[in-house]
Amino acid sequence: MLVNLPQQSKDLLQANGFSVSRSDRPASRTAVDMTIEQTINKHAKTSGGIVGFSRSLPAYYRWCVTRHNRAQYVSATYQMANIESKNCETHKESSLSERKLSEKAVKKTMDTFSAFLNPFDTEREHLVCISSGQKVPEDIADDPVKVEDVGKKSFKEFVITTSCQLIVSHVPLWKGRKKKEGQDAYDAWFAAHKPLCTANHDGSAGMMEVEASRVLWGRSLERKFRYTTIISDGDSKTYNEIIKLNPYPGAEVVKEECNNHVAKRLGTGLRNLISAEKKKGNTLGGKKAGALTQRAIAYGKVPPPHQGKSSCYLAPRVAEAVRPDYERFTTDALLSRCLRGMTQNANESLHAQIWQRCPKHLFAGRKRIELATTMTIANFNCGRLGLQQFISAAGCNVNSNTISRGQRRDAKRVARAQMRQLESSKKRRLEISIATSRAQQEYEKLEGGPSCASGVF
């Protein structure tokens, strides 16, 4: 390829065209790509990269075309402020401040190595830490000797715990073995397993929430407080069980609805209605005027004014089919529980952080779940400071770098949350969602309809 280069390019390469010198200092040439990174890209970049600069494509094009000019302005400003210089007499590394920093770093490294102990010194009676010189506790000092026994014990506990989960989940793990070895073999296994068993619930997964509510409300008076209100999502019979329990005689536990879940149930009810009527041969959806479309359910289309019109927004047949769901979701009892506009957003946020550490679709033992929950609560309530206190309580050192990094992450998280709460951000997210939906509809229209849908093909 170099043979086919123009003569002007060949002359440039022969004159050290692979490198660039930005000053008169000798032996200070750098590669072309590194020079671009140190000048144009460094001086023209913005905080947050391209995404933080702008989401507008024309603005991005203008930035690409003019970024070299911006880099020239920044470089000229640095030279005027004597931050950058083409002086060939001295190098930047030879300045007084740079020499002090280098000497400090070298001294710190030498002091660190001087504090180390000789690992080959056999005259010491106790096992010591090489970096700190402190005596290692006896229980830890014996770990290298007992590592094999500890590993075998941990493996046995893991196998027994996993087997326990399989049995609690009604998987017939011992079914075949019972037939071959009999009930005595199972009894012997269960007797050895029972002291190590971590299962705390025997029943269906749906009853776990109910059992947890019984524990919480049952012990609340012992903890010197009461749960006077429950924000329900309507997914379980927790509130009914609390009423039966009657934890506070003479005081009623008030039930309020999560508005997000009520809206979700409304949408689900309307979609189920369309599916049920479709099986009967009745079509409520479609493109006809007054049809109950998916877009009307999802985005709540504003009906036209009724003044001067004899027909309603929905077709009469559609209105008649929707009436039972309408009456079910407009009862005084349900609406009175929605007046305060309560949601379970805080709970969902906490659960999402727990699932990041311990995914809910994968089995995990009780110890891991408790550890993930404890770490999440510490982070949720106190930010990174809570996690650092948790790590410190576990016997691990927390240095200044960890603290400062945690403070920066907390500040960034709070700033991001505040930005998302702005009306402009909410409006922008809604516009993106609607634009995406419209684009999908346009694609399907050009393609002659949807190409993938549940049960359609």
Image (tube, grey):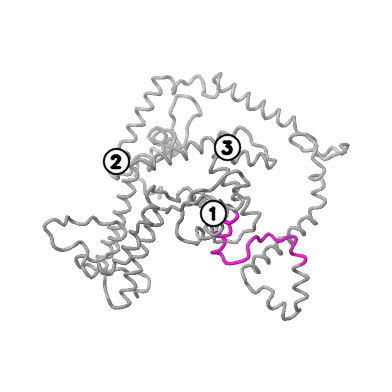
Name above or below for residue 287 compared with residue 373.
Answer: below
> In the visual, does 221 lie left or right of 151?
left
Q: Which residue is rendered at x = 73% and y = 60% of the image?
A: 196
* Number of numbered discs overlaid on the protein picture: 3
Mark 1 falls on what kind of element?
helix
- The residue lying toward the viewer, choosing from 422 and 302, is 302
- Residue 178 occupies quadrant: bottom right
Magenta-highlighted residues: 191-215
> Disc 3 to disc 1, how far (Cα)?
21 Å
- Residue 329 occupies quadrant: bottom left
- Residue 378 occupies quadrant: top right
> In the visual, does 289 lie left or right of 300?
left
Residue 339 position within the rendered picture, expressed as x and y whole percent measured from the top left = 37, 49
**Which label sits in the foreground, 3 or 2?**
3
Q: Is 105 included in the stretch rendered in magenta? A: no
Q: Please, which residue is most extreme toward the left here?
A: 308
Which label sits on residue 285? none
**Circle 2 residues within 10 Å: few <14, some 14–19, many ≥20:** few
Q: Please, which residue is most extreme toward the bottom here?
A: 179
Which label sits on residue 355? 1
- The residue lying toward the viewer, choosing from 294 and 208, is 208
Mark 2 falls on what kind of element?
helix
Mark 3 falls on what kind of element?
helix
Residue corresponding to mark 3: 385
Name above or below for residue 414 compared with residue 447.
Answer: above
N-terminal of the two: label 3 or label 2? 2
Magenta portion: prevailing SS class? helix
Which label sits on residue 59? 2
Q: Which residue is rendered at x = 57% and y = 37% of the image?
A: 385
Q: Which residue is rendered at x = 64% and y = 58% of the image?
A: 365
Q: Which residue is rendered at x = 36% and y = 31% of the image?
A: 71
N-terminal of the two: label 2 or label 1? 2
